[in-house]
Amino acid sequence: MISKAKISFIKSLHSGKGRNEAGLFIAEGTKITNELLINQNIKIQSLYATNDFLEENNLLSNNNFEVFEISESELQKISLLSNPNKVLVIAEICKNKFDVSKLKNKLTIVLDNVQDPGNLGTIIRTMDWFGIKNLVCSETTVDVYNPKVIQATMGSFLRIKTHYVNLENFIKEYFSKYKYNIYGTLLNGKNIYKEQLTQEGLIVFGNESKGISSNIENFITNKISIPDFSKSKSIDSLNISIAAGIVFSEFKRTT
């Protein structure tokens, strides 16, 4: 049986403040848990699971973390999901050391103040699909360890190196070193399907409602957009995660 103190502690990790203070995050569900169990870069602290999960899973035989068998009703108390899926894991936040030189000769995704956890999670999952490994976020972008982000990535967060930085300082340093193209997705950008796209540089996506901030837009060297083929005045923009998938696909098409 899980104690009230444990329940309170786990619930504290639902918030950014709680995660930062503890240096821990929550992941839920069988798929993500199994990926965590075989990942060498993330250290699991504890696992809370129903008897069904524990009996079915053969990855727990050599664990070096605490395992707690709990009931479905107890899982409901600590979960953020409306329908919890057998298991919840608490793991240590991985601090990726940021080094601009690691971005040389690569495409890197940059997010400027993206706020929706689902959007961030889907972008990370889509990056994983297209083999884009580095993500740089503004300090105001939603936390990658937000449980809703983790859930939306479906485990892809384990394969993407995500960094939170002062974007203006980062772009200045990056461009001074490499002079690569800095692409920005803007409504007044050029038709992406008619542009010559390079295989190194930054691709910047802005806030869901406000777009790329003016101070970051000043650094954009190549403004690109996805044309509105419908010509419908009732549609003003694409969802950012859908737009990201289209943009990634077009860049990879030219490889």
Image (cartoon, rainbow, N blue to C red):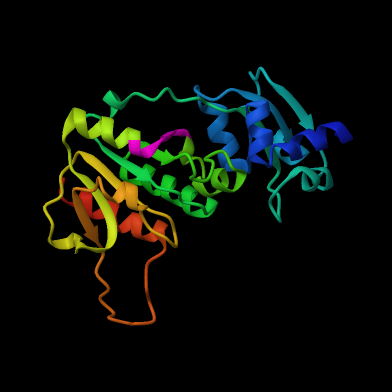
**Camera sees residue 143:** yes
Give whichever of 151, 54 is nearer the camera.
151
Name the side, left or right, on which 61 lies relative to 249: right
Look at 46% across and 40% down and name the residue there: 156
Is 11 in front, or is 47? Answer: 11
124 part of magenta stretch: no
Q: Horizontal placement of 215 versus 189: left or right?
A: right
Q: Residue at x 18, y 31 (%)?
A: 178
Q: Position of residue 81 (x, y in %)?
A: 68, 52
Instruction: Give the number of callouts.
Output: 0
Q: Quadrant of residue 210?
A: bottom left
- What quarter of the picture does the N terminus occupy? top right
Q: Residue sitting at 74 percent across and 37 percent down?
A: 12
Residue 94 image position (x, y, % from top left): 52, 26
Residue 103, located in which quarter of the rendered image?
top left
Residue at image x 41%, y 56%? Answer: 241
Q: Position of residue 155 (x, y in %)?
A: 50, 40
Q: Is residue 49 visible?
A: no
Q: Is residue 19 above or below residue 209?
A: above
Residue 164 falls inside the magenta stretch: yes
User: Which of the image's four quarters has the C terminus?
Assistant: top left
Residue 100 percent location from the top left of the image: 30, 27
Q: Which residues are magenta?
A: 158-168
